[in-house]
Amino acid sequence: MDKSLRISLAHGSGGIEMHEIIEKLIVSKVPMNLRNTLNGVGLDALDDGASIPLPNGKHIVISIDAYTVNPPFFPGGNIGILAACGSINDVLMMGGRPLAMLDSIVVEEGFPIEDLDIIINSFIDVLKNEKVALIGGDFKVMPKGHVDKIVITTTAIGIADKVIVDYPQPGDKIIVSDYVGDHGAVVMLLQMGLEEKVEEFSKGLLKSDVKTLTKLIVPLIERYGVYIHGARDPTRGGLAGVLNEWSSSTGTIIIVDEESIPIRSSVKRYSEMLGIDPLYLASEGVAVLSVDNSVAEEVVKFIRSLGFENTRIIGEVRQSEKYKGIVLGRTSVGGYRIIDPPRGELVPRIC
Amino acid sequence: MDKSLRISLAHGSGGIEMHEIIEKLIVSKVPMNLRNTLNGVGLDALDDGASIPLPNGKHIVISIDAYTVNPPFFPGGNIGILAACGSINDVLMMGGRPLAMLDSIVVEEGFPIEDLDIIINSFIDVLKNEKVALIGGDFKVMPKGHVDKIVITTTAIGIADKVIVDYPQPGDKIIVSDYVGDHGAVVMLLQMGLEEKVEEFSKGLLKSDVKTLTKLIVPLIERYGVYIHGARDPTRGGLAGVLNEWSSSTGTIIIVDEESIPIRSSVKRYSEMLGIDPLYLASEGVAVLSVDNSVAEEVVKFIRSLGFENTRIIGEVRQSEKYKGIVLGRTSVGGYRIIDPPRGELVPRIC
């Protein structure tokens, strides 16, 4: 291997470079028989989590995620809330009902204990609201300068009657449950030091969307489980990332109507100002679903009735002989553009 | 809370300060009914892992650990080997047979891809040897200077017929399976820049003991399961840490014969030179067991027959009305000294 090759920020962006390096350095090295346990969902899925079948026909669903968000406190939340919600959502997106969590906290020497206390209180408050048990953890301190403030890794465990294995089908409608990109926009603006210039921050109008999706996913699965062909939360890589992974893994085309994608005007405005496409911005409390056409309208109404009133259909999955694995956006002027998979590094330490 | 209070290295040392801050900031905040799942082993155990009972009478055993060792390469291993072995051993020590693992890698921008490749290959080689599946993971890059080189967090999952809940009983013999402190001594000497001065490094005589303990624990449990009242690997905090946790949680006295504790002469020599007690140095491939007196000698012979020829009895657990929760060392001159629980920070980033 070329000794001069170095890890770049793009390798951690959730886009093409990340998938390439994970495939090359990790997945390709693991023998096929060690990529899953008892034929559950495993490494090949490159999904948010994994599953292990149980003797009673149910499935353990498990996820791991490292949270490195910078700054650790942001409008709408902090790294503790993010670490709890993110892994709970990963389990939900696989069809699991979250039961338990383990946390691993790595903190920098000199970090204010008061701040750590606030972060951990927030983390535990999410678990309490969700009735998720904290069953174990690890706690390490790195010397000053060896880690920037704090990194939290969480593993969430749940039980699923049936695991949702993402495989969108031609004809499916693509549904999003809420405005996309709020979390990414907030963290990006903070990292650029624009907090004071952004009026929406002071008014509380622009904040991270970080939240759990239990109240959406659990009833949705109970009622429409067999019609849900894909469920993801569009974190790193944003909506563009999820849709490209789906079209690429199934060899379909996904066409979205850009006008119908819910994006806050403030997020649009700051994205334009910074030359960034909001479809690539992370959300931390939004579900993207691929739903059987026969029930799609009904599902939208149902999710709205659960309190997610911004839910809507934004596009559909199509089969084509000519084009495979691409995402198209129908623009406001009536034409189409290709929505590429994420590439390069938009913002480091977004989640 | 006092705003001036800051996290210190001692808070991550595995000793008194760490237990205090975890109790105060985390455990005390979690309601009793959310400290375990289905009455499995949970947060209160402050053990290496947790368990969740299954409908068929078996138990899921799960552990999480962040590995921050500095430097990431050391004689005898690297952070990838450590991250695989450490979490596999945590599952074993709870009586579980490791089945699956998830990893979360946080790496610094600019880290050589060749080094990462070596680390991941080592990690996967351990999993292959152990037939443990890698079922999922996360990969994040932090900007240069935001994290020192690499941090790996692993979650290992196993199945146990019966969970070993550490509760040493009066009369038990304390058994160690190998020389203690090698890993801690090696990392400490490297961090002090003494690598070139330490002849044993060049001769390969002094190296980390990092290894999995599957070949010891699985047959031991099969044959002597009910007689094993405690099983731990003495990582952070060393042998002194494990014994103090045991005596303190059970209100017993543990008396060890210091002469009989297997410590390499080189580890002894460098410990003396640096004014450090080797009983506090981490091991990464050693089992400490509390075994029913009736089978203790037999167990030692059995473990030796499995290839761990340095296994021996080093002490015993006693009940006393007068003293509770202390560890005593019988010294070479015939007297006793109190072996205190770990306090302060011996070496940061040891594991």
Image (cartoon, coloured by chain):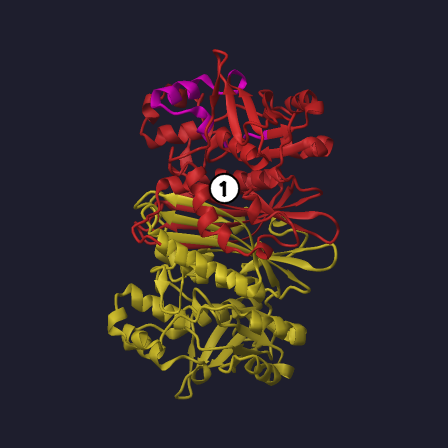
Chain colours: A red, B yellow
Image mark 1: chain: A
The quarter holding residue B79 reads: bottom left
Q: Is residue A277 left or right of residue A175?
A: left
Q: Quadrant of the N terminus of chain B?
A: top left
The quarter holding residue B215 reads: bottom right
Q: Nearer the viewer, residue B173 or B209?
A: B209
For the point 30% across and 69% down, the residue is B189
Residue B255 pos. (x, y %): 50, 79
Residue A125 pos. (x, y %): 54, 39
Q: Is residue A156 left or right of residue A186?
A: right
- Disc tally is 1
* Tag 1 secondary structure: helix
Q: Is residue B139 above or below residue B40?
A: above
Q: Which residues are magenta?
A: A259-288
Q: Nearer the viewer, residue B350 or A3?
A: A3
Q: Quadrant of the C terminus of chain B?
A: bottom left
The residue that label 1 is drawn on is A83
For the point 57% across and 66% down, the residue is B93
Q: Is residue B17 visible?
A: no
Q: Nearer the viewer, residue A287 or B63?
A: A287
Task: Give the residue type that dot 1 points to.
Answer: Ala
Residue A218 pos. (x, y %): 67, 35
Kindly give the residue lying farthest to the top in the view shown. A333
Is residue A111 a member of the stretch shown in magenta?
no
Q: Residues within 10 Å of mark 1 (few under 14, many from 20)?
A: many
